[in-house]
């Protein structure tokens, strides 16, 4: 057996350069821990002339990541370019075909092609590791596939997009509207090249679908995730939620029910004093619930050079140590095709509406809610400068989203509800 493990790194952006720096800085420490010298032999990116914050002069350069993946002097192909198709997919497939193990941070690739890639890896006797793809520096894939392997998982939940959490917490702390903070996030470089991946909930949905596959032994089914982004969360909702003891988070929840696999990524209210409610800025949090262990909360940086490279290197070290766990914790062919179920578990809901400020308006709304089977728990009315309109907040008792939607559809006919009302689920955490 060789006393070294040779990496080929495709992608020299935030994550790729972070990996280079760890290998250069900790060569002796890594060797002491895994018994092999971790070396980088070749790298690839689009622009060779770009100024990068690490010395790459010792490494061979490949313009084509597929050529890099096939090199004889590469044992592990590290894919940190991104994109669900194109070069990332082609190079990953080429690496497996050439007998290389793969480490990737690419959740978009795996959410779409994870099953096929896992089957290819197993057919070729290789492994694909992807700790960095979910919740950045938090070792959640390891927790699920190893530490919690003896548990039936009941529920996976979490805040898995740091950019959205930054936007929501910044809106609250600075009292700024969504559009202003979105622009700030863009200036700070927090947003993906396609911002809708972040604010549309897609990136977090990718991550949730990967965790659900491991947790419930099912094929990755990103298409079945009920997705709603944060674009419609207003500063009013954030303020009113805070007034009632809640914070709004882009929260992912996956659970297996008698009707099938429920996966949802949407803005939800959580108690302000809960661990999820306390989560600030770009930090991620994943909550795992197992039948034996109970609840585990993992919290940490979800993005950035150091944290993401840390997760990539954890995977590299496992490969160096000879750990070869199937990608989703069990052989790919044994993963079940999940039945997608619409989220049906009843929950309390937050409703915000604007009413005409006149006698009987509240009674009409209460009647519509009552007819839909929605029971009111708490209610608050605010003053409005116009004196003709009244913002009203309602927290319901537990009810289904279907019942809420029935009520919302009838608000217009009351003649007292102005504009569109907002309904957000209050998650029990
Ligand atoms: P990035 O900073 O945009 O870097 C992407 C790198 O890939 C660049 O070096 C780019 O080359 C190279 N590249 C793109 N297309 C290529 C092609 N066709 N051929 C060769 N090289 C190509 O991206 P990143 O933030 O490091 O993210 C990389 C991956 O990690 C993505 O899948 C991302 O979702 C995932 N991830 C990132 C983070 C994070 O905090 N950034 C966290 C978790 C996961 P040039 O430099 O020459 O343009
Ligand atoms: N855009 C992602 C986030 C990067 O904000 O969390 C890490 O996956």
Image (spheres, grey):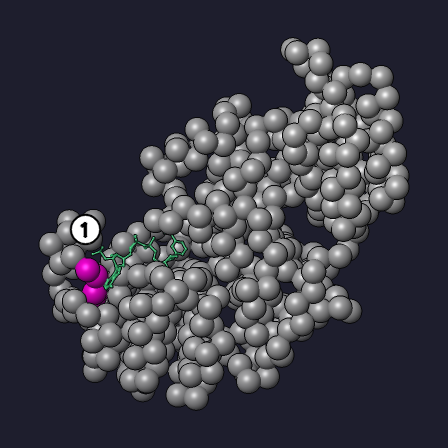
Label 1 beta carbon within 8 A of ligand 1: yes
What residue appears at the point 69 percent right and 39 percent down from the top-left corner? 423
Is 424 situated above or below 41? above
What percent of the width, then of the height, locates residue 410?
77, 39
What residue appears at the point 53 percent right and 34 percent down from the top-left corner? 169
Q: Could you say whether the residue bearing mark 1 is in a helix, strand or loop?
A: loop
What percent of the width, then of the height, locates residue 345?
77, 55
Residue interval drawn in magenta: 42-46
Q: Quadrant of the N terminus?
A: bottom left
Q: Nearer the viewer, residue 419 or 317?
A: 419
Is 41 situated above or below 192? below
Q: Residues within 10 Å of mark 1 (few under 14, many from 20)?
A: few
Quadrant housing residue 322: bottom left
Q: Nearer the viewer, residue 44 or 268?
A: 268
What percent of the width, then of the height, locates residue 286?
58, 53
Q: Which residue is mark 1?
A: 52
């Amino acid at each position: 057996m060789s006393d070294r493990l040779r990496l080929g790194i495709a992608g020299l952006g935030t994550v790729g350069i972070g990996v280079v720096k760890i290998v250069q800085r900790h060569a002796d420490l890594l060797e002491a821990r895994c018994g092999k010298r971790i070396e980088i032999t070749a790298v690839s990116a689009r622009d060779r002339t770009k100024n990068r914050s690490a010395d790459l002069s010792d490494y061979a350069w490949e313009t084509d990541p597929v050529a890099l993946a096939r090199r004889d002097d590469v044992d592990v192909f590290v894919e940190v370019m991104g994109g669900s198709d194109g070069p990332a997919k082609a190079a990953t497939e080429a690496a497996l075909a050439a007998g290389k193990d793969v480490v990737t941070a690419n959740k978009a690739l795996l959410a779409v092609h994870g099953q096929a890639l896992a089957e290819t890896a197993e057919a070729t006797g290789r492994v694909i590791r992807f700790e960095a793809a979910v919740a950045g520096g938090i070792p959640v894939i390891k927790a699920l596939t190893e530490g919690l392997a003896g548990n039936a998982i009941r529920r996976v939940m979490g805040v898995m997009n740091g950019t959205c959490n930054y936007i929501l917490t910044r809106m609250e702390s600075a009292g700024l509207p969504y559009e202003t903070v979105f622009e700030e996030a863009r200036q700070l470089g927090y947003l993906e090249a396609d911002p809708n991946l972040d604010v549309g909930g897609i990136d977090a949905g990718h991550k949730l679908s990967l965790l659900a596959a491991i947790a419930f032994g099912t094929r990755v089914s990103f298409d079945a995730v009920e997705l709603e982004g944060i674009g419609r969360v207003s500063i009013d909702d954030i303020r009113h939620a805070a007034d009632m003891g809640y914070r709004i988070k882009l929260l992912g929840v996956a659970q297996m029910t008698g009707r099938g696999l429920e996966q949802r990524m949407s803005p939800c209210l959580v108690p302000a004093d809960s661990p999820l409610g306390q989560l600030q800025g770009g930090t991620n949090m994943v909550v795992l619930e197992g039948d034996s262990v109970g609840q585990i909360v993992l919290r940490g940086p979800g993005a950035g050079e150091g944290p993401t490279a840390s997760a990539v290197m954890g995977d590299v070290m496992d490969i160096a140590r000879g750990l070869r766990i199937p990608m989703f914790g069990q052989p790919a062919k044994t993963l079940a095709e999940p039945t997608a179920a619409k989220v049906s578990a009843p929950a309390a809901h937050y409703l915000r509406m604007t009413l005409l400020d006149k006698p009987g308006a509240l009674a009409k709304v209460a009647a519509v809610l009552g007819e839909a089977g929605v029971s009111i728990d708490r209610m608050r009315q605010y003053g409005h400068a116009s004196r003709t309109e009244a913002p009203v907040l309602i927290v319901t008792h537990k009810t289904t989203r279907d019942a809420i939607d029935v009520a919302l559809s009838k608000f217009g006919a009351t003649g007292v509800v102005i504009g569109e009302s907002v309904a957000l689920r209050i998650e029990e955490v």
